[in-house]
Amino acid sequence: MSNGFDLIIEPGKSTKQYWRDLWKYRELFLFLSWRDILVRYKQTAIGIAWSVLRPFLTMIVFTIIFGKLAQFPSEGVPYPILVYAAMLPWQFFANSLAESSNSLITNANMLSKIYFPRLIVPASSILVSLVDFLISFVILAVIMLWYSFSPDWRILMLPLFLILAFFTSFGFGLWFAALNVRYRDFRYIVPFVVQFGLYISPVGFSSSVVPEKWRLLYSLNPMVGVIDGFRWSILGGDTPLYWPGLLLSTTLTMIIFILGLRYFRNTERTFADII
């Protein structure tokens, strides 16, 4: 029997209150992250094998096409290592974008029943991609041992570029997650973006093959700076780093992330009604 009162649960409208809510619901973030990891690896052998085989097979194909047939320069390192060092951030970006863009639709029942900061959903989905990244990094270590290749001190800078990869992935993920709720056609756009981005990013080749006059324009692709940073950290030696391009990619990444966060915050209160 109704007592004549309706309980309306609303999100914190101020930015300060919203961040407090994020901290308040931190256990939900951990629960969703752990749930997604368990679902991904519930058949452990298959899940881990897929995380390894996908970048490994792509590395082999790119090594044959760009390293053997096209004879692209390898910056003085074995070509498989050159490619795999780029596959790490690219797979992290591709997996994060795919998981986060569909995360709100996947958790539609939760969105329509209870209040919590919706930002938790796409953020927790990226953690699964981080697990894939760590598994792939172990395979890179094995490949480097196989070729008797060891990094130098610059490997210590790798966490900084991983953070940059996270913001790049999360920024695009927030845009696509919010747009996917309103326009379901975006679920078909994401695979195209990932596939197209793979070929316009310096994954199978070094960005040094791009003519100098086009290097800065090429760096308008935010993943160029991320991939170049990973290679610079992992390969060491004489591997060049195009600092103007890295600065441009980093600036664009932060702009995309900030605008994506603002758009997500402005539209999240309508998710439950639309979904």
Image: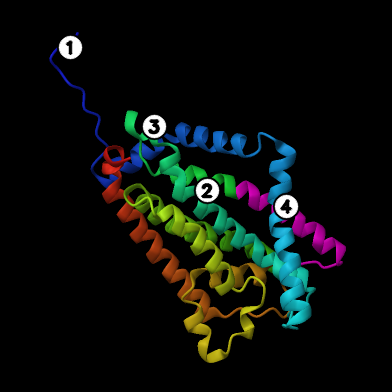
Q: Which quadrant holds the C terminus?
A: top left
CA gap between label 1 and label 3 equals 24 Å
**Camera-side residue: 241 or 256?**
256
**Residue 179, horizontal then vertical, whole percent:** 35, 53
Which residue position holds label 2? 126
Q: Check disc 3 and report the residue beneath it.
A: 110
Tag 3's secondary structure? helix
Asked if the residue at tag 1 contacts the one at tag 2, i.e. Cβ–Cβ closer than 8 Å, the answer is no
- Badge 4: few (under 14), some or many (20 or more) residues near its Cα, within 10 Å? some
Residue 275 drawn above or below residue 156:
above
Q: Tag on residue 52? A: 4
State which tag comes first along the sequence, 2 or 1.
1
Q: Which residues are magenta?
A: 130-151
Give the Cα distance between marks 4 and 3. Answer: 32 Å
| Place of residue 47 in the rendered image (x, y in percent of width and height, measured from the top left) | 69, 42
Helix, strand or loop: magenta stretch:
helix
